[in-house]
Image (spheres, rainbow, N blue to C red):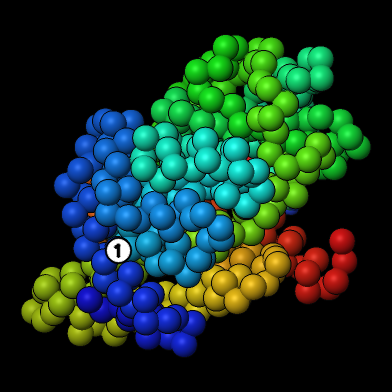
Amino acid sequence: MATRDFTELPFFAPEHRDLRKRAATIAKDATRLIDHHDIDSSCRTLVKAFAKQGLLNFSVPETRHDVRSLCLIRESMAYEDGLADFAFAMQGLGSGPIVLFGNEDQKSRWLPQVASGDALAAFAISEPDAGSDVAALTCTASPDGNEHFRLSGEKTWISNGGIADLYVVFARTGEAPGAKGLSAFLVPADAAGLTVAERIEVIAPHPLARLTFEDVRVPASAMIGKPGDGFRIAMSVLDVFRSTVGAAALGFARRALDESVNRSAERRLFGAPMAELQMVQGHIADMAVDVDAAALLVYRAAWTKDMGAARVTREAAMAKLFATDRAQDVIDRAVQLHGGDGVRRGHIVESLYREIRALRIYEGASDVQKVVIARQVMGVK
Ligand SMILES: Cc1cc2nc3c(=O)[nH]c(=O)nc-3n(C[C@H](O)[C@H](O)[C@H](O)COP(=O)(O)OP(=O)(O)OC[C@H]3O[C@@H](n4cnc5c(N)ncnc54)[C@H](O)[C@@H]3O)c2cc1C
């Protein structure tokens, strides 16, 4: 392996070094469970396997997430296969609102099922006209007597959509205009009126759907936190998981670098190993610097959160922005160094090229991260 073991950095404790080795082995084994032509059942199988190996205890902890562990696992999974990373990550993102803000009843009803892989979880906030602008969302939850709410509207781009057993749905309850008038609800997939309206196909296939809610009746006890807490809940969950998106990007980039180093050593060009060409060395050097710098930002953000920071908005935004953008460039260089093989369907660097792209869009597009960072740096709202 050409890339470094980042657990040697002072951000980590000895148990992280063990976890990294274990996660790398589990991730490698997981590739045998994946059929890219049947992503739905592959995700179910992967989640079950991760539960059996105890990995979901990290994504669905009883009290708080250890973000460094989440990042190490995502980095290891992404190194091997984007779908393995996706299946692991979604159990955490989907259950995050319950772990962080759920009451005891909500926790005891759902968390054991998610941690055992019996229930797949999803986080449903985006809408056709409210992606980056979360405060514009229009899905409503209206009181139906004192004991129930009725949800009406649409959600789109929902990861695990179509295979999830549980959706955490963010809807407008109207306590105040914009972001302050949202609440979070637990909605089982079999709730009457909830329909998977469309399965969405993307360049790196993952289960993804558009959902419609037609008068979906849920008990008031399905609300997570208090009325009007929805935006705060969503942002707190993203505060944990944003750095882990950077970690997944780091895993993809690390794989691209390793593949490129191997390729340069094996491939002969003009009578000598390609690795002897200085322009090739220039690419490798740039890739290695990006990988190491991304690791430092990702694990700084994770460490800062684990050390008890209430929010790591600045650190997590920097980690996600830098790691995903630079991974795109690292992988593009890997494609270049692989020549025609780089764009051959089914080649590892071809799949990395497709896998990385969405990470610069979801959980806050790169442009949005820049706005967040600038506001933090300048101290403006
Ligand atoms: C593969 C995938 C998985 C997803 N999974 C989920 C999920 O599980 N749950 C969920 O709720 N959502 C999910 N999403 C939705 C995702 O969060 C949104 O796509 C994202 O927030 C962008 O919203 P949008 O697509 O509506 O684009 P828009 O909001 O229309 O933004 C388009 C572009 O405008 C630019 N832009 C936006 N805001 C600014 C700004 N302030 N300043 C400068 N430029 C800006 C950015 O370049 C952005 O990419 C997923 C999306 C993808 C692609």
Given residues 222 and 132, the one toward you in this image is 222
Q: Is residue 198 left or right of residue 86?
A: right
Tally of numbered discs: 1
Kindly identify the residue that appears in the image at 78 percent across and 40 percent down: 226
Q: Is mark 1 within 8 Å of ligand 1?
A: no
Q: Please state, as top left, top right, bottom left or bottom right, where the N terminus lies in the image.
A: bottom left
Q: Is residue 105 left or right of residue 189?
A: right
- The residue sitting at the right extreme is 176
Q: Is residue 315 visible?
A: no
Picture coordinates of residue 131 (x, y %)?
67, 39
> From the viewer's perspective, is residue 122 above or below residue 241?
above
Q: Which image quarter has ligand 1?
A: top right
SS state under label 1: helix
Q: Please state, as top left, top right, bottom left or bottom right, where the C terminus lies in the image.
A: bottom right
Few, some or many residues within 10 Å of mark 1 (<14, 14–19, 20+): many
Three-letter code for the amino acid on which mark 1 is drawn: Ala
Picture coordinates of residue 306 (x, y %)?
57, 72
Picture coordinates of residue 42 (x, y %)?
27, 37
Kindly identify the residue that appears in the image at 11 percent across and 81 percent down: 272
> According to the image, label 1 marks what residue?
23
Given residues 164 and 333, the one toward you in this image is 164
Q: Quadrant of residue 277?
A: bottom left
Q: Is residue 349 left or right of residue 237?
A: left
Kindly identify the residue that appears in the image at 47 percent across and 70 percent down: 68
Kindly identify the residue that appears in the image at 76 percent across and 24 percent down: 140
Picture coordinates of residue 253 (x, y %)?
38, 66
Given residues 19 and 157, the one toward you in this image is 19
> From the viewer's perspective, is residue 9 above or below residue 143?
below
> From the viewer's perspective, is residue 35 above or below residue 28?
above
Q: Quadrant of residue 283?
A: bottom left
Q: Is residue 380 visible?
A: yes
Q: Is residue 346 left or right of residue 11?
A: left
